[in-house]
Image: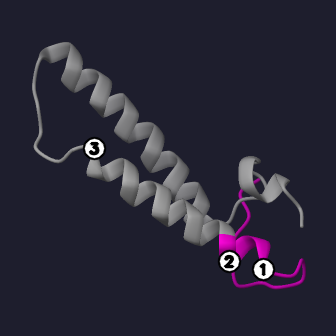
Amino acid sequence: MKLTKIYDPREMNSYQFVAATGLVMTAVANIILLLIGKAVPNFEALYLCWAVFFTLGTIVNLNSNPDDHDHHHHH
């Protein structure tokens, strides 16, 4: 098992990359909402969605072979 597929953006598949980007953008949006004093109902649910999306992408990535071409690596 190659653990760099979990944390290295160059080894992530598209699902992981989108989820990681979504998580960062959600965190930034959450900070902005806190700074301007606004609240969005159930906004925290986005964190769970991104975590599930990342987890599923990680499972796919860890179970893929290096010669599988069904996902895209970000370089």
Image point 51% across, 57% down: which residue?
18
In the rendered view, tell whether residue 34 sits above or below residue 51.
Answer: above
Q: Is residue 19 left or right of residue 9?
A: left
Q: Is residue 75 left or right of residue 26?
A: right
Prevailing secondary structure class for the magenta stretch in the rendered image? loop
Residue wearing tag 3:
44
Mark 3 or 2: the one toward you: 3
CA gap, disc 2 and disc 1 = 5 Å
Extent of the magenta region: 59-75
In the rendered view, tell whether residue 40 sits above or below residue 20.
Answer: above
Q: Position of residue 27 (x, y in %)?
A: 39, 33
Classify mark 3: residues with Cα within 10 Å, few (<14), some (14-19) or many (20+): few
Q: Is residue 28 left or right of residue 21?
A: left
For the residue marked with disc 1, what is the amino acid? Asn
The disc, 3 or 2, on the residue closer to the chain's N-terminal end is: 3
Q: Position of residue 62 (x, y in %)?
A: 78, 72
Residue wearing tag 2:
60
Classify mark 1: residues with Cα within 10 Å, few (<14), some (14-19) or many (20+): few
The disc, 3 or 1, on the residue closer to the chain's N-terminal end is: 3
Instruction: Identify the element where label 3 is drawn.
Output: loop
CA gap, disc 3 and disc 2 = 25 Å
Q: Are marks 3 and 2 in contact (CB under 8 Å)?
A: no
For the residue marked with disc 3, what is the amino acid? Glu
Regarding residue 53, the answer to whether it shows in the image is yes
CA gap, disc 3 and disc 1 = 30 Å
Q: Position of residue 65 (x, y in %)?
A: 87, 82
Q: Are marks 2 and 1 in contact (CB under 8 Å)?
A: yes
Residue wearing tag 1:
63
